[in-house]
Image (spheres, helix red, strand yellow):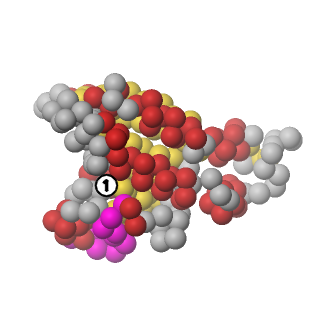
């Protein structure tokens, strides 16, 4: 499985996915210092600076797109502009990239204030892109960190891919599948070529 990292920071998501056996194919991060850290730890991975300048035209197809879009306008410590703010509004770029690249899965992270300052919009955008999503608010302490640090986690899957996977048993196509005899890779390639 392959992964592309949006708002990559210094590669926390990337490291976790690598440890789970995924291959990082590309990273998008605007901060020069963070890109230097990424370059040191992932020298062979393609990097991009601005999320507004990437998409289907220059991003390799991947199985998973992950990232935590900026939280400054959502956080209770911020001015409260929410997804209309200049920083947190970059969610719209995240959603655009999902529509264009069509990964099988999407993993999004943000602060708990997203639950009341934009979660409905994020979920509606994912649904409009053709993704079914589940979400929860989990503290870092739940996975062994010595602090609470609550975060909202959203995991979404391409509903077309999920339907196709459900129509297969043991790699065999079930009669009536809307995808005919195409392999999962062929279906993914077709989905990436089709307009959203």
The residues colored magenta run 40-51
Is 154 left, or right, of 164 in this rendering? Answer: left
Q: Is residue 184 visible?
A: yes
Is 4 left, or right, of 137 in this rendering? Answer: right
The image quadrant that residue 166 belongs to is top right
The image quadrant that residue 108 belongs to is top left
Q: Position of residue 11 (x, y in %)?
A: 26, 56
Residue at 57% x, 45% y is 129
Q: Position of residue 140 (x, y in %)?
A: 23, 33
Q: Is residue 42 magenta?
A: yes
Q: Is residue 156 above or below residue 100?
A: above
Residue at 75% x, 40% y is 167
Mark 1 crowd level (few <14, some 14–19, many ≥20, 10 Å Cα): many
Q: Is residue 131 above or below residue 29?
A: above
Q: Position of residue 93 (x, y in %)?
A: 42, 53
Give whichever of 45, 69 is nearer the camera.
69
Give whichever of 9, 175 is nearer the camera.
9
Q: Is residue 190 magenta?
A: no
Residue at 19% x, 67% y is 32
Say which residue label 1 marks: 7
Q: Is residue 63 above or below residue 145?
A: below
Q: Secondary structure at mark 1?
A: loop
Count all numbered tags in the image, as a single digit.
1
Give whichever of 168, 47 is nearer the camera.
47
Q: Position of residue 151 (x, y in %)?
A: 28, 33
- The residue furthest right is 175
- The residue furthest left is 146
């Amino acid at each position: 499985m392959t992964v592309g990292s949006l708002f990559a920071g210094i590669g926390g998501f990337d490291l976790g996915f690598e440890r789970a056996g995924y291959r990082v194919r590309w990273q998008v991060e605007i901060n020069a210092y963070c890109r230097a850290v990424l370059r040191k730890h992932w020298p062979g991975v393609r990097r991009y600076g601005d999320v507004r300048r990437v998409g289907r035209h220059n991003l390799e197809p991947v199985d998973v797109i992950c990232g935590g879009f900026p939280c400054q306008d959502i956080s209770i410590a911020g001015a409260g502009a929410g997804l209309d703010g200049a920083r947190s509004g970059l969610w719209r770029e995240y959603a655009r990239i999902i529509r264009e690249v069509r990964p099988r899965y999407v993993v999004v992270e943000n602060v708990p204030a997203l639950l009341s300052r934009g979660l409905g919009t994020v979920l509606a955008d994912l649904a409009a892109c053709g993704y079914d999503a589940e979400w929860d608010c989990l503290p870092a302490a739940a996975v062994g960190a010595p602090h609470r640090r609550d975060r909202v986690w959203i995991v979404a899957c391409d509903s077309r891919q999920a339907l196709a996977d459900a129509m297969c048993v043991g790699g065999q196509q079930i009669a009536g599948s809307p995808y005919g005899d195409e392999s999962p890779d062929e279906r993914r390639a077709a989905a990436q070529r089709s307009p959203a």
